[in-house]
Amino acid sequence: MIPRVLSIAGSDPSGGAGIQADIKSISALGGYAMAAITALTAQNTRGVTAVHAVPPEMIRAQLDALSADVAIDAVKIGMLGTIAGIDVVSDWLRSHRPPVVVLDPVMVATSGDRLLEPPAEIALRALSALADVVTPNLPELAVLADEPAATDWDAALDQARRVSRRDGTVVLITGGHLAGERSPDAIVDARTEEVVVVDAARLDSTNTHGTGCSLSSALATVLARGESLDGALRETKSWLTEAIAAGPALGVGGGHGPVDHFVRTRAADEPARWWALTAAVRDRIDASPFVRALGDGTLAPAAFRHFVKQDALYLRDYARVLARASALAPTREEQTFWSDAATAAITGELELHTRFLGEEPAVSEMSSTTRAYLDHLLAAGPGYAVVVAAVLPCYWIYQDVGNRLAGRNHADHPYSSWLATYADTAFAAATRQAAAYVRAACAVAGADERLAAERAFVGAAHHELAFFSQQDHLLAD
């Protein structure tokens, strides 16, 4: 099921916080996002310059229109701004209770300024009792507790217990305001005395605009998928950590920039981006004397024999790399795919010799070009994404070249069977499957592993060019 998640919050025209951040977060975590706007703001990454509260009757009209037509699986509540807005949302929740309600109590600005008048703060404390989870940062937790702000983690946990006990709700506290190298978050449920802490290293980043909004809306989405609270926190925190780390690459604003909500979506498209990065290399392969002569059938037999012999030697160690991919693969299907590919590489070596070399003995000496390519593959890792990224060009580039050369194939072509092999529909299907596994691996890999995977892919593409070109000196009969 795709969870249908409603955000009730203010807007941020810069796109980093509020409704805009919520829509991105819900979408990034697999939900369908809806929005009821409570306030219009004029802001950017440097601060807020104006706020216009939406009249309470318009807030209610938005909520009634949605609940009259759409099944809402989860609600995230953010900035409400006025006591009238809080009262409207509280009344709507009492009459239209969604399965999941997450409250991000927007009460204190990043600067430390209080955003609500005392009567509205009291109303928001009452609203927290209607939520399944409340997600305050430490200054907001202090306002909810009506106590001074906690100055250490243990004091924050104790404060969260008191709020949880008073309101009968789960409190998810974030430790971003604490000093130190760690940035823990915790789920505190005084009803069961459960405390689940999820720790992480603190990121040295100014791209933190909208992190509270993003955390709460992402959490609501994952909970609506049926995940447990601690599982939802772990998944959400992992995603948000990656999004913060990737934020600077967006290049948005000169203040506290946004996070990259779609960091994992971009990661899933990494192979396509690498393919674009290697366009010039692939153009050089197409224009290489070997490939052009192979296509038109004028390739010298000595050059083709040299290519086939080196390819056979290559396949021996290539099979070892495929076997390593199988050992690292996270699923049975992937293990089987790479294992079968390793077996095919070994049998392919024998078949190449039989079909194209006959009784001619195999060359015993591997060229420096072939050795360099294999060294590149054997050094790939240690992560699974890096290994499979390194072997992908051997699929993708051969299939790409084969597709173009297939149009020049004919019954009397001297290398017809070789051209047919790489234009084969089964090989095309295997290439698509290999690329899909690389995308899946990149989607769950960290930023460092994805960068290493990119380098492995691009490096292998350059080695493919060298491999095709190493026969150039033999092109004349």
Image (cartoon, rainbow, N blue to C red):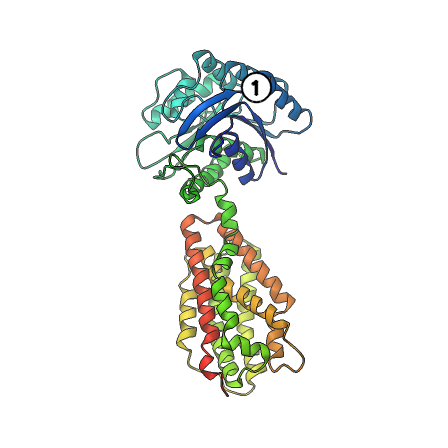
Residue appearing at x 51%, y 35% in the figure: 232
The count of marks equals 1
Expressed as whole percent of the image width and height from the top left, the position of residue 396 reads 54, 64
Residue farthest to the top, as pictured: 119
Q: Considering only vertical position in the picture, is 451 above or below 363?
A: above
The amino acid pointed to by label 1 is Val
Q: Considering only vertical position in the picture, is 269 above or below 373?
A: above
Expressed as whole percent of the image width and height from the top left, the position of residue 10 reads 51, 25
Look at the numbered disc 1 and give the secondary structure of its residue.
Answer: helix
Q: Residues within 10 Å of mark 1 (few under 14, many from 20)?
A: many
Q: Considering only vertical position in the picture, is 299 above or below 421?
A: below
Q: Is residue 327 visible?
A: no
Q: Is residue 364 visible?
A: yes
Image-quadrant location for residue 293: bottom right
Residue appearing at x 58%, y 29% in the figure: 35
Expressed as whole percent of the image width and height from the top left, the position of residue 185 reads 41, 32
Q: Which residue is mark 1?
A: 89
Q: Could you tell me which quadrant the N terminus lies in?
A: top right
Residue appearing at x 49%, y 49% in the figure: 267
Expressed as whole percent of the image width and height from the top left, the position of residue 161 reads 42, 22
As rendered, which of 138 and 457 lies closer to the eye? 457
As rendered, which of 209 and 309 lies closer to the eye? 209
As rendered, which of 275 and 327 lies closer to the eye? 275
Left/right of residue 3 with respect to residue 438 in the rendered view = right
Residue farthest to the right, as pictured: 69
